[in-house]
Image: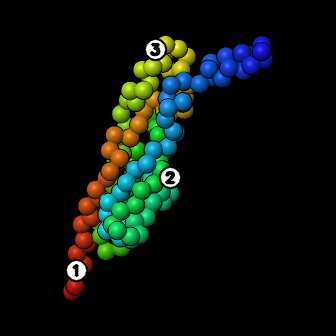
Amino acid sequence: MKKTLLIITIATALSSCCTIFTASRQNVTFMAPNGTKIYDVETNVKIAEVEKDNMVTTKIKKKLSDKQLIARKEGYAPTPFILETEFNVSTLWNILFWPGFLVDLGTGKMFKWDNTIVNVELEPVEECWE
């Protein structure tokens, strides 16, 4: 009985509201022409590619700050855009257990992506014929 109570106490102490109620990654849907590739500007890693129905949904790890992305497709100008973060209100439950704020801040779960559906408008590149 004491072991069970100790395990429950430790688990509660090391968790927080966002850790319990939300994931560290969030679905984001990109709407763009088929063949568009979405890259993370910081790492230049492809995070998604629109392959059919002009949309793709992918899970993106939550961060403390906004995330800069760029959409690329052959024949179109690269289009930069930003995923903005906002405060995750479920974090407020940590008022009942204040160390949970530190856990949520450390795991990135204190914030969430504001715009989960992103419409990417690409502009065609005009080629000069001389």
Q: Secondary structure at mark 1?
A: loop
Point out the tag, 2 or 3, that comes first from the N-terminus: 2
**Which residue extends farthest front?**
1
**C-alpha gap between disc 3 and disc 1:** 61 Å
List x then y, in percent, for residue 25: 50, 43
What amino acid is found at the position of numbered circle 2 in the picture? Thr
Residue type at tag 1: Cys
What residue is rendered at 49% in x and 35% in y? 22
Q: Which residue is mark 2?
A: 43
Cα–Cα span, label 1 and label 2: 32 Å
Tell me whether the residue at label 1 lies in contact with that at label 2, contact meaning CB atoms closer than 8 angstroms. Answer: no
**Residue 10 appears at what percent x and percent y?**
68, 19
User: Most extreme residue toward the bottom, as rendered?
Assistant: 130
Q: Which residue is mark 1?
A: 128
Mark before the other along the chain sequence, 3 or 1: 3
Q: Position of residue 59 (x, y in %)?
A: 47, 50
Disc 3, SS: helix
User: Front-most of 126 and 14?
Assistant: 14
Element under disc 2: loop
The one of 82 and 87 positioned closer to us in this rendering: 87
Q: Residue at x 35, y 57 (%)?
A: 30
